[in-house]
Amino acid sequence: MMSRESMEYDVVIIGGGPSGLSTAIKLKQLDSNLNVCILEKASEIGAHILSGNVFETRALDELLPNWKELNSPIKTKVNKEKFLFLGKTKSLSWPTWLLPSVQKNHKNYIISLANLCRWLGEQAEALGVEIFPGFPANEILYTEDGSVKGVVTQDMGIDKDGNKKDSFEPGIELLGKVTVFAEGCRGHLGKQLIKKFQLDKGKDPQQYGIGFKEIWEIDEKNHEEGLVMHTAGWPLDNNTYGGSFIYHAENKQIFLGYVIGLDYKNPHLSPYDEFQRFKTHPDIEKIIKGGKRVSYGARALIEGGFQSLPRMFMPGALLVGCDAGTLNMPKIKGSHTAMKSGIIAAETINEHLKENKDLSIFEEKFNISWLHKELYHARNVKPSFSWGLILGIIFTGIDQILFRGKLPFTLKHKHADHDTLKPANQMSKINYPKYDNVITFDKTSSVYLTGTNHTDNQPVHLKLKDPNLPINYTLEKFDEPAQRYCPAGVYEVQKENEVNKFVINSQNCIHCKTCDIKEPSQNINWVTPEGGGGPKYGNM
Amino acid sequence: MKILVAVKRVIDYNVQIRVKEDGTGVVTDNVKMSTNPPDDNAIEEAVKIKEAGKATEVVAVTVGEEKAQETVRKALAVGADKGIHVQADGILEPLAVSKILQKIVDKEKPDLVFMGKQAIDDDCNQTGQMLSALLNWPQATFASKINVKDNKLEVTREIDEGLETIEINVPAIVTCDLRLNEPRYASLPNIMKAKKKPIEKIVVSELGVDISPRLEQLKVEEPPKRKAGIKVANVAELVQKLKNEAKVI
């Protein structure tokens, strides 16, 4: 083992998203003398952030009550809402008064979460937080008694065979009195912590979705700034959980996206192609016709909610935001909840450092917070959709409108997402239409828009536990679904001299983590590539 | 020996450039910005020369808006000793930048000035050459190898015909090619130290330089989209199409 330089902080935060930044800001507000740093794998804060996003300001109101005076990028208030059920060519508009109150957005704002994070980053730096973009944390450090003592940053300048290049720069140890893991959905260190400390003991299996987002600049006459529209139904069948969003933001832009539950069963399903196909619906096409697609991205999101939420404290560390899974699924919002979990984490840490209280007080604080209440009331919505769209909607109506989430029972999530695929020969193939390069596009030109790059001569950061499994097992049984669930075309099965070969184009990886979640044998392990790699999202 | 290195903040090379709808320029809002890649090579070379004991000080300078000082900060994190940020907003043409750099040279009195061979945003490839003329110093452009010898530099240049090696007297201007070296990564401790290194701020108006643009930009537009290709059945059809449709043979 090589000796590494180390740096000591009071608090080391892994991940510069809403939860990590909120933790940092709150810590400095509580005690400006605390030394706090944030490690971020992207080349700058915001470059790996992707979200719808209709933003509820509740947590921000608590964190920075004067945000309106601080030139925050929260400008477009929601002024109109629509909900459509799509058939193949027709649509049915659902009256918004019949929507559960959690899906009403009139007090919320249409924002770019990436821009919000950039701005939160500036606020944090102004308070004295050290932010290090381009430095992924790739290993957890433990003390002899087994508690977390910090992380090691990624070594830089290693070639694809694992040898040191001339530019080699060893990672360094960042040691914190408390380490906060805020990596977002399916953090690769969070995953290790959940396993090591059995944080998910007694909880339901975690549930995930994959979310796509495109930004379009559209014709002025189709643009209604402040309009929020959601759809359910076509092109998905009744048994696949998902839906779309279309948010009319400023500057004639719309944020157009699609979310599909990763508990889908048909290995022939391609989430990417469902999204592309969705745009060809007459009611959607008419909005984007004549417009121009300017951005693309995808990211897994966490949907398990209350039943799947792991314990968020452990010796020496806390797990916050979507690294744990605080997203509110019926609200389709995770930013305010992630931020609130960060605020609670900061309060916990401050008392831990000052009054020597155990980090387990996080749970007490969480249990009396509005965050707990929100997630508790939302808990039955997602599992009810395992009965199909129609029954799910009927149940959700009863649960959310009549009982406001207070039904005296809790539905369970039964399966982990990697367990849900049926064998390929038992499921029907799906013929997706060809891309027209006007409103639908292939994966290559989509990935091009993400600005994704990884230094080419570096180890592959998508590790196969068994390198032969994709061809020997997964291809035959599931028609290797990685070819379809990856939104960036990283995985391909190529025929070379009549022999199938599994190819990993890791340089295209947009860090969505879907493969790590959905691979039926859990054979793919996503680890951090060299710092600064991955997408360079703008206002996603 | 003292080396002055000029660095420029440009749109990151991985970002897909978008033209503004009104044709007045390209979109820079919420776009990842970085140091112009060959400027990184220029900094790296200067730091290497210093590490080899052949230079005593490396000063990084940039000209541009407030955020441009990030590029200076980055240069400080990989080994520059001191930074200068000349604050200037709006369009800066190579002539304006070279006149500003001339003033900085007068003030700092370096023996060498390094910079990238060209910036990836405007692709002008002029600033080094203009500065050379203004200072009446020798220049070595497109350097892929630099050898420091007492009061001379031996520089290998990447030219169309291959490699050309020349010898020039110091003081001199060198513009750097991407093949010159592999820039190092900034380590975390060095980034921390760089935050404490001084950056001198100069407002461009203090320098008494006329930076008004000499060029009138008429329009910025995207290159035409490449049309989809077609498949031909045989060579005869290909020849026929090249002759009659494409009219290239």
Image (cartoon, grey):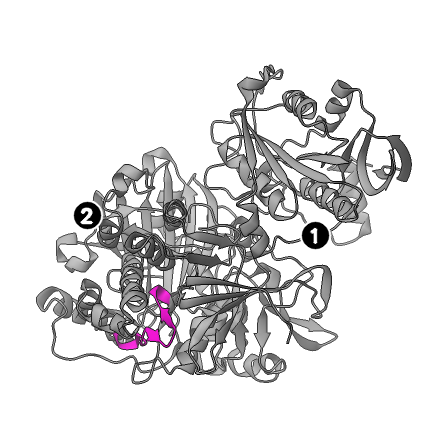
Which residue corresponds to mark 2? Answer: A107
Callout 2: SS: loop
Q: Is residue A243 above or below residue A269?
A: above
Nearest the viewer among A489 and B176 is: B176
Callout 2: few (<14), some (14-19), or many (20+) C-alpha neighbours within 10 Å? Answer: few
Q: Is residue B235 above or below residue A487?
A: above
Give the chain of mark 1.
B
Residue B124, percent from left and from top: 69, 29
User: Magenta stretch?
Assistant: A306-322
Is residue A321 within the magenta segment?
Answer: yes
Give the mark count. 2
Q: Amino acid at mark 1?
A: Lys
Nearest the viewer among B99 and A273 is: B99
Residue A456, percent from left and from top: 67, 59
Which residue corresponds to mark 1? Answer: B231
Nearest the viewer among A190 and A447 is: A190
Task: Note whether residue B11 is visible.
Answer: no
Give the chain of mark 2.
A
Q: Residue at x 74, y 35 (%)?
A: B2
Task: Note whether residue B222 is visible.
Answer: yes
Callout 1: few (<14), some (14-19), or many (20+) C-alpha neighbours within 10 Å? Answer: few
